[in-house]
Every structure is written in structure tokens, then in C-alpha cells.
Image: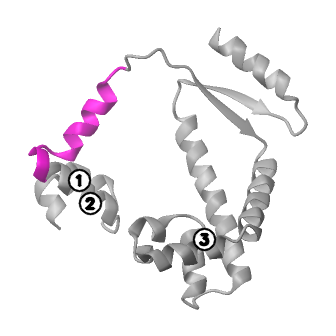
Amino acid sequence: MELIKVDEEYSKKISPNDIRRIIRALEVYYTSGKKFSSFQKQWKERKSIYDLTLIGLNKNRDELYNDIEKRVDNMISSRLSDEVEGLIKKGYGNSLALKQAIGYKEVLSFFNDELMKKEVINLIKKNTRNFAKRQLTWLRADPRVNWIFIKKNKKFDSIIKKIIEIIS
């Protein structure tokens, strides 16, 4: 693999099947002459010139998953399949981004007769839940995030009040 030759450190951090990251790392190397991993070290050490306040909104996992289910159902009823079909007709059917986007990749499987409609819907829900879990895991690792737990029937006024307390 070419990336191992030019940036062994970064190649160990990513999957050998992650074509997008491999291509990006090689682009960086061949345009700048520097390893992608060297830029990553700089990004970690760099301090922001802005005074940032990060706020994360969190809710009960069951409520989050229920909201995801509703959102996917709304996407389906809003004709997600027509949207994907339109993108294919415009020539984006082989787009790597389209093939990786949650919702789109599953609908593509339906168009290719690989999955039934019910399987597609369930897979979109599952993949969205998994993505939300990864996002929360990543954000929770950031000590700068000020978390606000949202209860099911909590009024927005109390959430706004809490945000104002944090940023004041």
C-alpha cells in the first residue's frame, strides 16, 4: 500500500479499506511534501484564537432513538427514494459520498435489488442510531463540552436559561 511508504504512522491509524482517507492523506503528501500525520500533530497542539464555549445537548437514549426512528420515517415519507433517484439521474450514482451517506447508501441497495423496502428502513434506522452513538462518544471525550441534559417535556426556557448561565 502506497500510504505505508509515505506515512506509516497515519496508515496504522486508519482502515486499509478507508479509501477516502487514504486518498486524502496521499493528496496532502504529494501536494505539500509533508506527512498527513505531521499536520494532525499540529492541529492537536494548536490553540484557538477564539474564546469558545462548547455546549452539548443530551437526552435519554430511548428518547434519542425514538426521535431517530421518527426522523427516518419522515425522510421516507418525504420521498427520500425520489431524491436518491434524482441524484442518480444527474450522474452522482457512483459518487463515493453518496455511497457512504446514511440513508442514501441503503436506498441505493434497494434500487440495486439487494434489499427490500422494510429492510432499507430498518437499516437506515440502525445506521443512524450507530452514528449518533459514535458522535456522542466522540463529543463526550472532549472536556471542553458543557453538557445539558434535556428531559422529554423540558421547556425551552429552562434550556436557554442554562445556556445563558454557561456562557455568562
**Three-letter code, disc 3:** Glu
Q: What stretch is highlighted in magenta?
A: 30-47
**Three-letter code, disc 1:** Ala
C-alpha distance separating marks 1 and 3: 32 Å
The tag on residue 149 is none
Residue 58 x/y as whole percent: 71, 37
- 10 Å crowding of disc 3: few (<14), some (14-19), many (20+): few
C-alpha distance separating marks 2 and 1: 5 Å
In the displayed orientation, state which residue is furthest to the bottom.
113
**Quadrant assignment for the N terminus:** bottom left
The residue located at (30%, 66%) in the rendering is 16
Left or right, 19 with respect to 137, comes to: left
Left or right, 8 with respect to 84, comes to: left
Q: What element carries label 1?
A: helix
Compared to 141, does 19 lie above or below? Answer: below
**Does the CB distance between marks 2 and 1 fall below 8 Å?**
yes
Compared to 90, does 145 lie above or below? Answer: above
Residue placed under numbered mark 1 in the picture: 25
The residue located at (31%, 57%) in the rendering is 21
Residue placed under numbered mark 3 in the picture: 83
Residue 34 x/y as whole percent: 12, 43
Residue 43 part of the magenta segment:
yes
- The mark tally for this picture is 3
Residue placed under numbered mark 2 in the picture: 22
Colour logic:
one colour
Judged by depth in the image, the label closer to the viewer, 1 or 3, is 3
C-alpha distance separating marks 2 and 3: 29 Å
